[in-house]
Structure formats: C-alpha cells, structure tokens
C-alpha cells in the first residue's frame, strides 16, 4: 500500500513539469495559429512569465519525486525484492510489483526532466 502512495505522490509531483514539457512539444508540432499549439504556447508563456515556476514546478517538485522514488526503490532493493530475483515468473512479478515498477519509471522520468531543465539553464 505504501508503494502505491509513493507512486501517486510522484505522479502528482511530476505533473506540472510533464505538462510543461508536453506543451513545449505540442507547440512545435503545429503552427501557433492552430488550437492545440496556441493553447500550448499560452501555457509555456504562463510558466515563462513567472520566475517561481522554474524553481518550484520544474526543479523542486521533480527533485522531490526523484529523491522519494529513489529512496523507495533502494529500500525495496535492499529488502531483497530486486527485479533479478523475480526473473522466474516475469509476468507474475510484473503484476505483483506493478506499483514498484511505476515508481521506478516515475523516478527515471523525474531524473530526465531535471536533466533537461538543468541543461537548458546552463545553456542560458
């Protein structure tokens, strides 16, 4: 049950940054006059107009998700519930450990978002 709570918490922490990254991609796919690209541009401009969004929504929340998820993955790994031990029944292990796999995927997503944001900040 705690793993599911961590998974939901990470999902909530990553949502603002994932929304921003998705808006960046959507606005590049179509001309800005069309509707999905126009709304995406408005969202990007909202983030850009407020300095706190960079620090809180694009750095602090993904960093919190990375730390929380990393701690959970390491704790489970140290308890002996490593993916290597579950290799015999891969499908059963995936079903039984789906929340933990979700936490690991969200943790990797948080790391990716942080890398993108930090590289962008270093480039400017």
Image (spheres, rainbow, N blue to C red):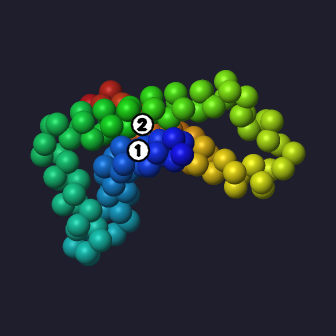
Q: Position of residue 100 (x, y in %)?
A: 60, 43
Quadrant of residue 25 within the rendered picture:
bottom left
Q: Position of residue 7 (x, y in %)?
A: 49, 46
Q: Are marks 1 and 2 in contact (CB under 8 Å)?
A: yes
| Residue sitting farthest toward the right | 88
Q: In the depicted view, which residue is nearer to us: 122 or 54?
A: 54
Quadrant of residue 63 within the rendered picture:
top left
Q: In the image, is 65 to the left or to the right of 93?
A: left
Q: Position of residue 24 (x, y in %)?
A: 33, 54
Q: Position of residue 86 (x, y in %)?
A: 79, 41
Q: In the depicted view, which residue is nearer to us: 11 or 37?
A: 11
The correct choice, above or below, for 14 with respect to 19 in the image is above
Mark 1 to mark 2 CA distance (whole Å): 8 Å
The answer to whether any part of residue 28 appears in the image is no
Badge 1 density bin: few <14, some 14–19, many ≥20, Cα 10 Å: some
Q: Which residue is mark 2?
A: 65
| Residue sitting farthest toward the bottom | 34
Q: Secondary structure at mark 2?
A: helix
Badge 2 density bin: few <14, some 14–19, many ≥20, Cα 10 Å: many
Give whichever of discs 1 and 2 has the lower sequence position. Answer: 1
Q: Which residue is mark 1?
A: 9
| Residue sitting farthest toward the top | 78
Q: Secondary structure at mark 1?
A: helix
Q: Which residue sits at x=59%, y=27%?
A: 75
Q: In the image, is 60 to the left or to the right of 70?
A: left
Query: Which quadrant does the C terminus fall into?
Result: top left
Q: In the image, is 14 to the left or to the right of 52?
A: right
Q: Nearer the viewer, mark 1 or mark 2?
A: 1
Q: In the image, is 111 to the left or to the right of 94?
A: left
Q: In the depicted view, which residue is nearer to us: 55 or 3?
A: 3
């Amino acid at each position: 049950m705690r793993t599911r709570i961590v998974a939901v918490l990470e999902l909530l922490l990553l949502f603002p940054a994932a929304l921003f990254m998705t808006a960046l991609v959507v606005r590049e796919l179509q001309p800005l006059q069309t509707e999905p690209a126009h709304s995406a541009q408005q969202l990007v401009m909202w983030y850009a107009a407020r300095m706190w969004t960079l620090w809180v929504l694009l750095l602090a929340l993904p960093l919190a998700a990375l730390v929380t998820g990393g701690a959970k993955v390491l704790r489970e790994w140290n308890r002996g519930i490593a993916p290597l031990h579950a290799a015999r029944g891969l499908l059963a292990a995936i079903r039984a450990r789906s929340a933990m796999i979700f936490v690991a995927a969200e943790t990797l997503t948080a790391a990716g978002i942080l890398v993108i944001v930090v590289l962008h900040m270093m480039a400017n």
